């Protein structure tokens, strides 16, 4: 039974989501205070998080950033909830690590469909029986969802991990931003290529050496996209 954590301060919305997800066979828990959200996530270790943008104690943006910065929970997919009256940039949501977002008011069928879709994508990614990939000082272990650099485990978000694996599998090939967007984020985000550039920048900081003479893995092909360099 998949575990879903709802972080939502409006009790009627929380109860509505909880009831419907339970009827779809999910194990559901939640908190209404953003200030204790990370503690609850670490204790419950859900398979997916539904995270409201505006919360008492700590807002959803800050919570999502903390999730992605914590190696214990960084892999957990996040669906962001936001009211139509709230200013929310979809690209910003993707940049901070949200896997999807939905605006209030929403149909419960749509929410359940999005939950299942995100869980399905994550499950497919983690269940693939693939051999480890060694490139330079990087070791990618797809079966364990782990990446090492010089023997040290890297704290990658789910999207950073997917991006790295896809680039590494197609090393030497020039991949356009739209190709990467479609492969990693799906058709819902077609055309919003800025988020690809942001994730590439974050990924470079984690896998590449900061020194000028250090190893560089991802090459920018101006006006086109990116290439993962073998040598």
Image (tube, rainbow, N blue to C red):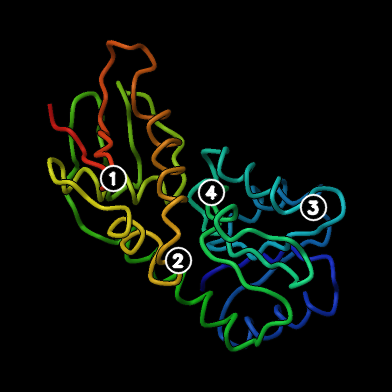
The percent coordinates of residue 155 (x first, y second) are 46, 36
Tag in front: 2 or 1: 1
**Relative to residue 118, is residue 56 drawn left or right?**
right
Which of the two labelled residues, at mark 4 and mark 3, occupies the earlier sequence position?
Answer: 3
Q: Are marks 4 and 2 in contact (CB under 8 Å)?
A: no
Secondary element at tag 2: helix
Q: Pointers 3 and 1 in contact (CB under 8 A)?
A: no
Give residue 34's mark.
Answer: 3
Label 4–label 3 contact, CB within 8 A: no
**Are the residues flagged by discs 4 and 1 in contact, CB closer than 8 Å?**
no
Residue tagged 4? 95
Q: Nearer the viewer, residue 27 or 224?
A: 224
**Mark 2 — residue?**
189
Closest to the observer: 69 or 91? 91
Q: Nearer the viewer, mark 2 or mark 3?
A: 2
Q: What separation in Å lies between label 4 and label 1 (alpha carbons)?
A: 21 Å
For marks 4 and 1 on the same chain, the one whose residue lies earlier in the sequence: 4
Of the image marks 3 and 1, the number of the one nearer the N terminus: 3
Q: Secondary structure at mark 3?
A: helix
Residue 117 lies, in percent from the top left, at: 45, 75
The numbered dot on residue 138 is none
Q: Is residue 101 above or below residue 223?
A: below
Query: Mark 2 or mark 3, which has the lower sequence index?
Result: 3
């Amino acid at each position: 039974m998949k575990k879903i954590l709802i972080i939502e301060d409006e009790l009627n919305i929380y109860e509505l989501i909880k009831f419907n997800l339970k009827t779809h066979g999910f194990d559901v828990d939640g908190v209404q205070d953003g200030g204790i959200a990370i503690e609850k996530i670490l204790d419950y270790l859900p398979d997916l998080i539904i995270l409201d943008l505006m919360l008492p104690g700590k807002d959803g943006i800050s919570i999502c950033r903390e999730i992605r910065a914590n190696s214990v929970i960084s892999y957990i997919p996040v669906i962001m909830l936001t009211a139509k009256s709230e200013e929310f940039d979809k690209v910003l949501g993707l940049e901070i690590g949200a896997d999807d977002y939905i605006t209030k008011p929403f149909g419960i069928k749509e929410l359940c469909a999005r939950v299942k879709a995100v869980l399905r994508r994550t499950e497919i990614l983690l269940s693939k029986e693939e051999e480890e990939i060694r490139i330079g000082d990087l070791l990618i272990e797809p079966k364990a969802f782990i990446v090492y650099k010089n023997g040290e485990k890297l704290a990658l978000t789910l999207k950073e991990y997917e991006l790295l694996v896809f680039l590494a599998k197609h090393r030497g090939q020039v991949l356009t931003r739209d190709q990467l967007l479609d492969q990693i984020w799906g058709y819902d985000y077609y055309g919003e290529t800025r988020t690809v550039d942001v994730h590439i920048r974050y990924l470079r900081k984690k896998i590449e050496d900061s020194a000028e003479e250090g190893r560089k893995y991802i090459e920018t092909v101006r006006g086109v996209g990116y290439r993962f360099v073998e040598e």
